[in-house]
Image: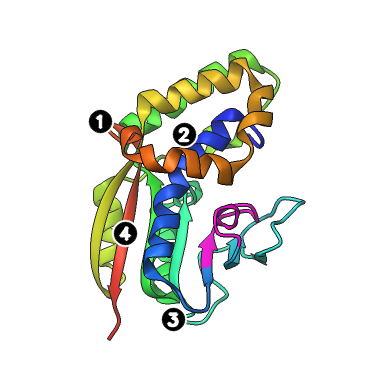
């Protein structure tokens, strides 16, 4: 899925609320923690920040402002209250069980001082869209396996109610705001472009550029049924 029109545009849209949350917090030491960025996540949009990225694997060309931390379980190798903010998007649903997902949420909350920003594809409508894309992908490239689609279908996606209960089970005081992210029909349109014109990634790979282009119009992409929820978890650890 790397270097595709789908990846570039969808990833930019899913990262806009994460970047805005970081900038709003005005972190003095400009160090944040990302879970599941593969070395090329939020660092694209925040080149002046140091990103501590925990993931099971990383791309070859890790961004220069990213410090990778290999982590293959749901316990983060970081002390409590390590960073003002912990961010993650489209990671949680790739953990096989709700038990592991809940443990990861608890760990993100433990490591964060002030806020966790968590993007998660939720619900049956989102999963059905991914299944549709999986059928299209198989027709286009019948010999290729798509791990993204396979894990979504095999593991299933949590519901909004599931995530809220997992946050509550962390036993920290938290105020949770939910934002919708990326209209499903628009997301499927991205996939059609990806399948028909995969080489157009040469135009759309410049993520910071598209972040500035799409940012002012972000609200237009998030109406109706959406692919994911963004959970803004504001913590009270006093």
Q: From mark 1 to mark 4, how far is it between C-alphas? A: 20 Å
The quadrant the N terminus occupies is top right
Residue 106 locus on image (x, y percent):
39, 69
Element marked by disc 2: helix
- Residue that numbered label 2 is attached to: 153
Q: Earlier in the sequence, mark 2 or mark 3?
A: 3
Residue at which label 1 appears = 224
The local crowd at label 2, few if under 14, some if 14 to 19, many if 20 or more residues have their Cα within 10 Å, is: some
Q: State if disc 2 and disc 1 touch (CB < 8 Å).
A: no
What mark, if any, has residue 232 been given in the picture?
4
Image height of 176 relative to 121, above or below: below
Kind of element beneath mark 3 = loop
Task: Tell whether position 223 is magenta.
Answer: no
Disc 2 versus disc 3: nearer the observer:
3
Residue at 66% x, 17% y: name it: 142
Out of 185 and 218, give the one closest to the viewer: 218
Task: Choose mark 1 or mark 2, whichever is in front.
Answer: 1
Q: State the separation of the CA atoms marked 2 and 3.
A: 34 Å
Prevalent SS, magenta region: loop
Against 68, is 188 above or below?
above
Q: Which mark is residue 81?
A: 3
Sequence order check, earlier mark of 1 and 2: 2
Q: Which of 148 and 223 is in front in this view?
A: 223
Q: State which region is magenta.
A: 33-47
Residue 61, how many percent across, how many down? 75, 52
Residue 72 visible to an observer of this rendering: no
Give the class, few, some or many, for how many residues have Cα within 10 Å of label 3's Cα (few <14, many ≥20): some
**Mark 4 or mark 3, which has the lower sequence index?**
3
**Residue at horizontal 45 percent and vertical 52 percent from the top:** 92
Judge the density around disc 4: few (<14), some (14-19), many (≥20) Cα neighbours within 10 Å. many
Q: Does the magenta stretch include residue 35?
A: yes
Whether residues under marks 1 and 4 lie with C-beta atoms below 8 angstroms apart, the answer is no
């Amino acid at each position: 899925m790397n270097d595709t029109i789908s990846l570039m545009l969808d990833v930019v849209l899913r990262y806009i609320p994460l970047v805005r949350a970081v900038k709003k917090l005005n972190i003095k030491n400009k160090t944040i923690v990302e879970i599941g960025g593969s070395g090329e996540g939020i660092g694209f949009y925040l080149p002046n920040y140091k990103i501590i990225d925990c993931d099971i694997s990383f791309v070859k060309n890790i961004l220069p402002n990213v410090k990778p931390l290999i982590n293959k379980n749901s316990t983060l190798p970081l002390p409590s209250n390590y960073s003002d903010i912990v961010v993650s998007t489209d990671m949680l649903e790739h953990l096989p069980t709700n038990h592991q997902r809940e443990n990861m949420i608890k760990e993100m909350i433990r490591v964060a001082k002030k806020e966790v920003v968590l993007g998660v594809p939720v619900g049956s409508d989102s999963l059905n869209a991914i299944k549709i894309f999986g059928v299209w992908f198989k027709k286009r490239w019948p010999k290729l396996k798509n791990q993204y689609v396979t894990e979504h279908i095999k593991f299933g996606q949590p519901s909004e109610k599931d995530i809220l209960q997992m946050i509550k089970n962390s036993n920290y005081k938290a105020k949770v705001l939910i934002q919708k992210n990326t209209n499903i029909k628009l997301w499927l349109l991205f996939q059609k472009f990806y399948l028909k014109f995969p080489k157009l990634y040469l135009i759309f790979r410049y993520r910071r550029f598209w972040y500035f282009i799409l940012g002012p119009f972000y609200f237009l992409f998030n109406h109706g049924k959406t692919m994911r929820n963004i959970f803004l978890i504001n913590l009270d650890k006093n």
